[in-house]
Image (cartoon, rainbow, N blue to C red):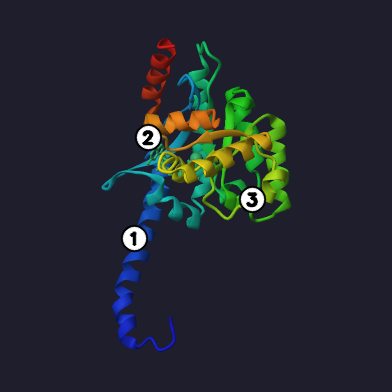
Amino acid sequence: VAKGAGKSQWRRYQPELHTTIVERLELRAELDRAIHDGGLLLEYQPIVRLDDGHAVGFEALLRWNHPTRGRLTPDAFIDVAEESGLIVPIGEWVLRTAIAAAATWRKGQAYGAPYVAVNVSARQFRTPGFVRLVKRELAASKLPPSCLMLEITESLLLRDDDQVWDDLAEVRRLGVRVAIDDFGTGYSSLSYLRHVPLDVLKIDRLFTGTVTTSTQQRALVDGIVRLAHTLGLEVVAEGIETTDERELLRRIGCPYGQGFLFSRPMPLPDALRWLRRTELAA
Ligand code: C2E
Ligand code: MG
Ligand code: MG
Ligand code: MG
């Protein structure tokens, strides 16, 4: 509390605080139940080659069918999941479910199997046994490790933790690929990019959304794409919504993208239908 804050201010703020804590506790209990009652689901959004629109992968995105509030996206509950540690069992479920989905769409694929990209929170990645979990799930599903991509965030890398580095190197030795998500939104010093074991850089949609607005913005994205190429990283642009954005990104030299222009995230059956349809159109 700031110096000089009187009693009256306490009285004014307390009810809000109270509501928030109760709400969060409630949310946490409901989330705990959802893990066991099948209340969580994954949607899949295609990641495509910008020149021909073919899917090279799908990103698995978590949803929660909340009993009263409807379908929630991660913004509404990922904080609570992190704070409470529920992110660990949730993350396990996500990994297992996403790998199973990839095993499904691998069957009868004419154009090489699209990978599945799984978001892994820093807390989940740093849980002892995470690499073992990845190994176990891959072995159980018989999915080739190259069909799995883990999306991590800058916050994980900024911890400067040797264990994180070792674990990243180990999952990559398995053949699993690692992407840095939301690139450009954090506090990334460019220097770490040279050292971190990474395969893919995902340009945040903040940049994608402005690529058509000015030559300056375009130059910025152009710089990121060149940087990625120089470091030997693949590049994916997030949040492509218009054909202009797609065209500009393609011309800049960004080979891959995802966004509402191609498809919104879809439940698995729809994703499979989408895949068949786009393959037939080729
Ligand atoms: P993200 O990994 O950067 O995922 C991309 C987000 O952008 C998704 O939001 C997706 O639905 C949205 N998006 C895709 N294309 C477009 C577009 O063209 N326009 C706009 N405006 N948005 C687009 P979503 O599904 O709400 O997920 C939000 C974030 O939650 C994700 O950001 C990711 O950081 C996190 N998340 C999602 N699933 C998981 C999970 O299983 N585990 C963890 N730890 N985090 C997850
Ligand atoms: Mg992601
Ligand atoms: Mg992202
Ligand atoms: Mg994002």
x and y percent of residue 273 in the render? Answer: 38, 18
Please tell me the numbered disc located at residue 241.
Answer: 2
Q: In what element is the residue under mark 3?
A: helix
x and y percent of residue 85 in the render? Answer: 51, 53
Left or right of 244 on screen, residue 201: right
**CA distance separating discs 2 and 1:** 34 Å
Left or right of 161 on screen, residue 60: left
Beta carbon of the mark 2 residue lies under 8 A of ligand 1: yes
Of labels 2 and 3, earlier in sequence is 3
Which is nearer the eye, 13 or 49? 49
Task: Kindly identify the amino acid type of the residue bearing the numbered disc 1.
Answer: Glu
Q: Residue at x 65, y 56 (%)?
A: 159
**CA distance separating discs 2 and 3:** 29 Å
Task: Kindly identify the amino acid type of the residue bearing the numbered disc 3.
Answer: Leu
Mark 3 crowd level (few <14, some 14–19, many ≥20, 10 Å Cα): some
Q: Which residue is mark 1?
A: 23
x and y percent of residue 126 in the render? Answer: 63, 49
Q: Residue at x 71, y 49 (%)?
A: 163
Q: Is residue 266 something that shows in the picture? A: no
Q: Which residue is mark 3?
A: 157
**CA distance separating discs 1 and 3:** 32 Å
